[in-house]
Image: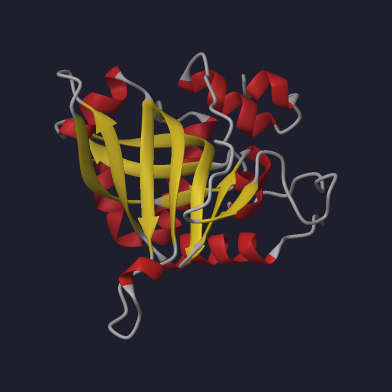
Amino acid sequence: MPHVPRLTQELRSLLDRQRVASLGTVGDDGAPFVSMVPFAIEAQSASLVIHVSGLAAHTHNLQSRERVSVLIIQSEVPTELVHALPRVTLQGYAKVLARGTMEWEACSSAYLARFPDALSMTELGDFRFVAIAITNGRHVAGFGVARSIGPDEVQLAFGRNTRPPKCANTSRGQKFQFIGKVSPDPIQPEHRSAKDAIWALRSGDAPSNQILQN
Protein backbone atom coordinates (compact mmCIF):
# COMPACT_ATOMS: atom_id res chain seq x y z
CA MET A 1 0.00 0.00 0.00
CA PRO A 2 1.63 3.29 -1.07
CA HIS A 3 2.26 6.02 1.46
CA VAL A 4 -0.30 8.81 1.03
CA PRO A 5 1.10 12.22 2.05
CA ARG A 6 -1.04 14.58 4.09
CA LEU A 7 -1.60 17.04 1.22
CA THR A 8 -2.67 14.19 -1.03
CA GLN A 9 -5.18 13.11 1.60
CA GLU A 10 -6.50 16.66 1.72
CA LEU A 11 -6.84 16.72 -2.06
CA ARG A 12 -8.64 13.37 -2.01
CA SER A 13 -10.98 14.72 0.66
CA LEU A 14 -11.72 17.78 -1.48
CA LEU A 15 -12.59 15.55 -4.45
CA ASP A 16 -14.81 13.40 -2.23
CA ARG A 17 -16.68 16.33 -0.67
CA GLN A 18 -17.31 18.41 -3.77
CA ARG A 19 -19.64 17.11 -6.45
CA VAL A 20 -19.64 20.03 -8.89
CA ALA A 21 -16.80 21.37 -11.03
CA SER A 22 -16.20 24.20 -13.48
CA LEU A 23 -15.28 22.80 -16.89
CA GLY A 24 -13.17 24.86 -19.26
CA THR A 25 -13.36 24.14 -22.98
CA VAL A 26 -12.51 26.08 -26.14
CA GLY A 27 -15.14 27.11 -28.70
CA ASP A 28 -14.90 27.10 -32.46
CA ASP A 29 -13.96 30.78 -32.38
CA GLY A 30 -11.05 30.08 -30.02
CA ALA A 31 -12.78 31.71 -27.06
CA PRO A 32 -12.69 29.96 -23.66
CA PHE A 33 -16.00 28.62 -22.38
CA VAL A 34 -16.63 27.70 -18.73
CA SER A 35 -19.60 25.65 -17.57
CA MET A 36 -20.83 23.77 -14.51
CA VAL A 37 -20.72 19.97 -14.48
CA PRO A 38 -21.43 17.39 -11.78
CA PHE A 39 -18.54 14.91 -11.67
CA ALA A 40 -17.43 11.57 -10.28
CA ILE A 41 -14.05 9.86 -10.03
CA GLU A 42 -13.17 6.59 -11.77
CA ALA A 43 -10.07 5.61 -9.81
CA GLN A 44 -8.55 2.88 -11.97
CA SER A 45 -8.27 5.04 -15.06
CA ALA A 46 -7.50 8.21 -13.04
CA SER A 47 -10.42 9.81 -14.88
CA LEU A 48 -12.93 12.43 -13.94
CA VAL A 49 -16.36 11.39 -15.26
CA ILE A 50 -19.08 13.74 -16.44
CA HIS A 51 -22.49 13.08 -18.02
CA VAL A 52 -23.41 15.67 -20.62
CA SER A 53 -25.97 16.40 -23.30
CA GLY A 54 -24.93 16.29 -26.93
CA LEU A 55 -26.81 19.56 -27.35
CA ALA A 56 -24.61 21.42 -24.85
CA ALA A 57 -21.92 23.82 -26.03
CA HIS A 58 -19.25 22.22 -23.84
CA THR A 59 -19.94 18.80 -25.38
CA HIS A 60 -19.40 20.15 -28.89
CA ASN A 61 -16.26 21.91 -27.73
CA LEU A 62 -14.63 18.89 -26.09
CA GLN A 63 -15.46 16.66 -29.05
CA SER A 64 -13.76 19.16 -31.37
CA ARG A 65 -10.86 19.98 -29.03
CA GLU A 66 -10.21 17.24 -26.49
CA ARG A 67 -7.92 19.19 -24.19
CA VAL A 68 -9.87 20.61 -21.24
CA SER A 69 -9.38 22.11 -17.79
CA VAL A 70 -11.41 21.53 -14.63
CA LEU A 71 -11.62 23.62 -11.44
CA ILE A 72 -12.88 22.07 -8.21
CA ILE A 73 -13.15 24.37 -5.20
CA GLN A 74 -14.36 23.96 -1.64
CA SER A 75 -17.69 25.58 -0.87
CA GLU A 76 -17.45 29.01 0.68
CA VAL A 77 -17.65 29.19 4.48
CA PRO A 78 -18.81 32.54 6.00
CA THR A 79 -16.10 32.53 8.67
CA GLU A 80 -13.20 31.80 6.29
CA LEU A 81 -11.32 33.98 3.81
CA VAL A 82 -12.30 33.12 0.26
CA HIS A 83 -8.62 33.42 -0.70
CA ALA A 84 -7.88 30.43 1.53
CA LEU A 85 -10.45 28.08 0.02
CA PRO A 86 -8.84 24.75 -0.98
CA ARG A 87 -9.06 24.12 -4.71
CA VAL A 88 -7.49 22.22 -7.56
CA THR A 89 -7.18 22.93 -11.26
CA LEU A 90 -6.83 19.76 -13.32
CA GLN A 91 -5.67 19.45 -16.92
CA GLY A 92 -6.70 16.53 -19.09
CA TYR A 93 -8.07 15.10 -22.29
CA ALA A 94 -11.77 14.37 -22.79
CA LYS A 95 -13.19 11.33 -24.54
CA VAL A 96 -16.85 10.55 -25.24
CA LEU A 97 -17.35 6.91 -24.28
CA ALA A 98 -19.10 4.37 -26.49
CA ARG A 99 -22.03 2.74 -24.71
CA GLY A 100 -21.38 -0.82 -23.57
CA THR A 101 -17.57 -0.67 -23.60
CA MET A 102 -15.52 -1.52 -20.52
CA GLU A 103 -14.65 2.16 -20.07
CA TRP A 104 -18.33 3.10 -20.30
CA GLU A 105 -19.31 0.46 -17.75
CA ALA A 106 -16.63 1.55 -15.27
CA CYS A 107 -17.32 5.26 -15.64
CA SER A 108 -21.12 4.95 -15.61
CA SER A 109 -20.90 2.83 -12.43
CA ALA A 110 -18.71 5.44 -10.73
CA TYR A 111 -21.05 8.26 -11.77
CA LEU A 112 -24.27 6.52 -10.75
CA ALA A 113 -22.77 5.50 -7.41
CA ARG A 114 -22.43 9.21 -6.71
CA PHE A 115 -25.59 10.38 -8.48
CA PRO A 116 -28.12 7.52 -8.32
CA ASP A 117 -30.93 9.93 -9.19
CA ALA A 118 -29.29 10.44 -12.63
CA LEU A 119 -30.14 6.89 -13.73
CA SER A 120 -33.11 7.99 -15.85
CA MET A 121 -30.93 10.56 -17.63
CA THR A 122 -28.57 7.81 -18.81
CA GLU A 123 -31.40 6.43 -20.92
CA LEU A 124 -31.89 9.67 -22.84
CA GLY A 125 -30.51 9.45 -26.35
CA ASP A 126 -28.67 12.76 -26.41
CA PHE A 127 -26.77 12.22 -23.13
CA ARG A 128 -23.39 10.53 -22.99
CA PHE A 129 -20.61 9.80 -20.52
CA VAL A 130 -17.30 11.57 -20.96
CA ALA A 131 -14.05 10.46 -19.30
CA ILE A 132 -11.45 13.15 -18.72
CA ALA A 133 -8.02 11.55 -18.36
CA ILE A 134 -6.25 13.82 -15.89
CA THR A 135 -2.58 14.37 -16.64
CA ASN A 136 -1.48 17.08 -14.23
CA GLY A 137 -2.76 19.97 -12.18
CA ARG A 138 -2.28 22.73 -9.65
CA HIS A 139 -3.40 22.21 -6.05
CA VAL A 140 -3.89 25.09 -3.63
CA ALA A 141 -4.22 23.59 -0.17
CA GLY A 142 -4.87 26.89 1.59
CA PHE A 143 -3.75 30.50 1.80
CA GLY A 144 -0.12 30.90 0.75
CA VAL A 145 0.61 27.30 -0.30
CA ALA A 146 0.39 25.81 -3.79
CA ARG A 147 1.93 22.84 -5.56
CA SER A 148 2.06 21.29 -8.98
CA ILE A 149 0.87 17.69 -9.23
CA GLY A 150 1.90 15.08 -11.79
CA PRO A 151 0.49 11.72 -12.93
CA ASP A 152 1.56 9.71 -9.87
CA GLU A 153 0.05 12.27 -7.50
CA VAL A 154 -3.16 12.38 -9.52
CA GLN A 155 -3.51 8.61 -9.32
CA LEU A 156 -2.96 8.62 -5.54
CA ALA A 157 -5.47 11.42 -5.04
CA PHE A 158 -8.02 9.63 -7.22
CA GLY A 159 -7.67 6.53 -5.06
CA ARG A 160 -5.83 4.22 -7.42
CA ASN A 161 -3.22 1.92 -5.85
CA THR A 162 0.12 2.74 -7.44
CA ARG A 163 3.76 1.89 -6.82
CA PRO A 164 5.19 3.90 -3.89
CA PRO A 165 7.16 6.91 -5.12
CA LYS A 166 10.95 6.77 -4.87
CA CYS A 167 10.86 9.51 -2.28
CA ALA A 168 8.33 8.92 0.50
CA ASN A 169 7.33 12.57 0.75
CA THR A 170 7.00 13.61 -2.90
CA SER A 171 5.63 12.35 -6.21
CA ARG A 172 7.00 12.77 -9.72
CA GLY A 173 6.14 16.16 -11.16
CA GLN A 174 5.18 17.56 -7.74
CA LYS A 175 6.68 20.88 -6.60
CA PHE A 176 5.81 23.06 -3.63
CA GLN A 177 5.98 26.82 -3.38
CA PHE A 178 4.72 29.74 -1.38
CA ILE A 179 2.51 31.98 -3.49
CA GLY A 180 4.42 35.10 -4.48
CA LYS A 181 7.74 33.31 -4.90
CA VAL A 182 9.03 32.15 -8.24
CA SER A 183 9.31 28.42 -8.87
CA PRO A 184 9.73 26.30 -12.01
CA ASP A 185 6.62 25.66 -14.06
CA PRO A 186 5.13 22.16 -13.89
CA ILE A 187 5.80 19.73 -16.69
CA GLN A 188 3.54 20.48 -19.60
CA PRO A 189 2.11 17.26 -21.11
CA GLU A 190 1.45 16.87 -24.82
CA HIS A 191 -0.63 13.79 -25.47
CA ARG A 192 -1.15 12.63 -29.03
CA SER A 193 -4.86 12.01 -28.36
CA ALA A 194 -7.38 11.45 -25.59
CA LYS A 195 -7.21 7.72 -26.32
CA ASP A 196 -3.44 7.72 -25.71
CA ALA A 197 -3.87 9.73 -22.52
CA ILE A 198 -6.50 7.43 -21.08
CA TRP A 199 -4.53 4.33 -22.09
CA ALA A 200 -1.36 5.63 -20.45
CA LEU A 201 -3.07 6.48 -17.18
CA ARG A 202 -5.17 3.29 -17.16
CA SER A 203 -2.23 0.95 -17.82
CA GLY A 204 -0.23 2.30 -14.90
CA ASP A 205 2.96 0.65 -16.13
CA ALA A 206 3.79 2.86 -19.07
CA PRO A 207 7.14 4.68 -18.62
CA SER A 208 6.68 8.30 -17.61
CA ASN A 209 8.51 9.47 -20.72
CA GLN A 210 5.73 7.91 -22.79
CA ILE A 211 3.15 9.93 -20.90
CA LEU A 212 4.87 13.31 -20.72
CA GLN A 213 7.15 15.21 -23.00
CA ASN A 214 9.32 18.03 -21.72
Residue 65 position in % (x across, y down): 32, 20
Give the side of residue 189 with respect to residue 1, left or right. Answer: left
Looking at the rendered image, the quarter that the C terminus falls into is top right
In the displayed orientation, state which residue is furthest to the right.
166
In the displayed orientation, state which residue is furthest to the bottom.
79
Q: What colour scheme was applied to this rendering of the protein? A: secondary structure
Give the side of residue 104 with respect to residue 31, left or right. Answer: right
Q: Which quadrant holds residue 206?
A: top right
Residue 69 position in % (x across, y down): 37, 38
In the displayed orientation, state which residue is furthest to the top.
192
Residue 125 shows up from this direction = no
Looking at the rendered image, the quarter that the N terminus falls into is bottom right
- The answer to whether 207 is drawn above or below residue 103 in the figure is above
Camera-nearest residue between 48 and 23: 23
Q: Which quadrant holds residue 78?
A: bottom left
Residue 72 position in % (x across, y down): 38, 55
Residue 83 shows up from this direction = yes
Give the side of residue 36 with respect to residue 97, left or right. Answer: left
Residue 110 position in % (x across, y down): 48, 51
Give the side of residue 52 with respect to residue 169, left or right. Answer: left
Camera-nearest residue between 55 and 79: 79
- The answer to whether 146 is drawn above or below residue 138 in the figure is below
